[in-house]
Image (cartoon, helix red, strand yellow):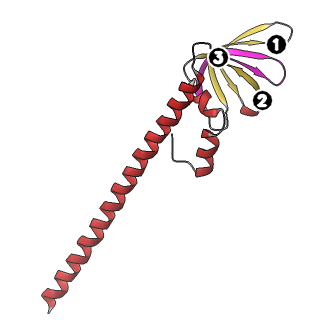
Amino acid sequence: MAVESGRSRFYFYNTMTCLLKALEGKTITVEIRNDKTVTGHLYFVERDMNLSMTNVVYSDTKGKKSSFSEFYIRGRQIRFVIIPDEVDIIKAMQWQIDKGEYYKGKERSVMQQNFQRKQNRQANQAAKQYRQSQKKL
């Protein structure tokens, strides 16, 4: 997950987006607002619940089916998502949250290391300036 604002992270963890993110790589069925269904391999989920799918079968209300190699659904067009039976929803969401906490912790440690390097650099520059001023005297 890229560096995002606090609002974006809050939205991600407090909506069903984190569940959909955990379903990446699985075959799901999505019903969109115009009563049509899309069944296919979930490739990628964006923060706003936009879905990128591959190997899709698109079914309209009359039963006509069309196949697509790639398909994109805007999040606000989704009515509901049928989750596969083999997915434990609680575990999938917990895994996604824990994964985010891992990266957040890793990001925090990198920030601490960068801060420590900056502090050391400033201390070395100050010591160097002090030694130079002492030589001039």
Please tell me whether residue 65 is drawn above or below residue 29 in the rendered image: above
Q: Are marks 1 and 2 in contact (CB under 8 Å)?
A: no
SS class of the residue under badge 2? helix
In the foreground, 61 or 10: 10
Q: Position of residue 55 (x, y in %)?
A: 62, 13
Q: Are marks 2 and 3 in contact (CB under 8 Å)?
A: no
Q: Is residue 109 left or right of residue 135?
A: right
Return the disc, 1 or 3, that comes first in the chain's sequence. 3
Q: Which image quarter: residue 120?
A: bottom left
Residue extending furthest toward the right: 62
C-alpha separation, residue under disc 1 versus residue under disc 3 = 17 Å
Q: Is residue 38 left or right of residue 47?
A: right
The residue drawn where x is 51% and y is 43% is: 2
Please tell me whether residue 95 is drawn above or below residue 57 in the rendered image: below
Image depth: mark 2 or mark 3 in front = 3
Please count the marks in the image: 3
What residue did someone put label 2 on?
77
- Most common secondary structure along the magenta stretch: strand
Residue 30 lies in the magenta stretch: yes
Q: Are marks 1 and 3 in contact (CB under 8 Å)?
A: no
Q: Is residue 16 left or right of residue 100?
A: right
Highlighted magenta segment, given as a residue range: 29-44
Amino acid bearing label 3: Ile
Amino acid bearing label 1: Asp
Q: Which mark is residue 28?
A: 3
Q: Which mark is residue 60?
A: 1
Q: Which image quarter: residue 71?
A: top right
Q: Which image quarter: residue 46?
A: top right
Residue 81 lies in the magenta stretch: no
C-alpha separation, residue under disc 2 versus residue under disc 3 = 16 Å
SS class of the residue under badge 3? strand
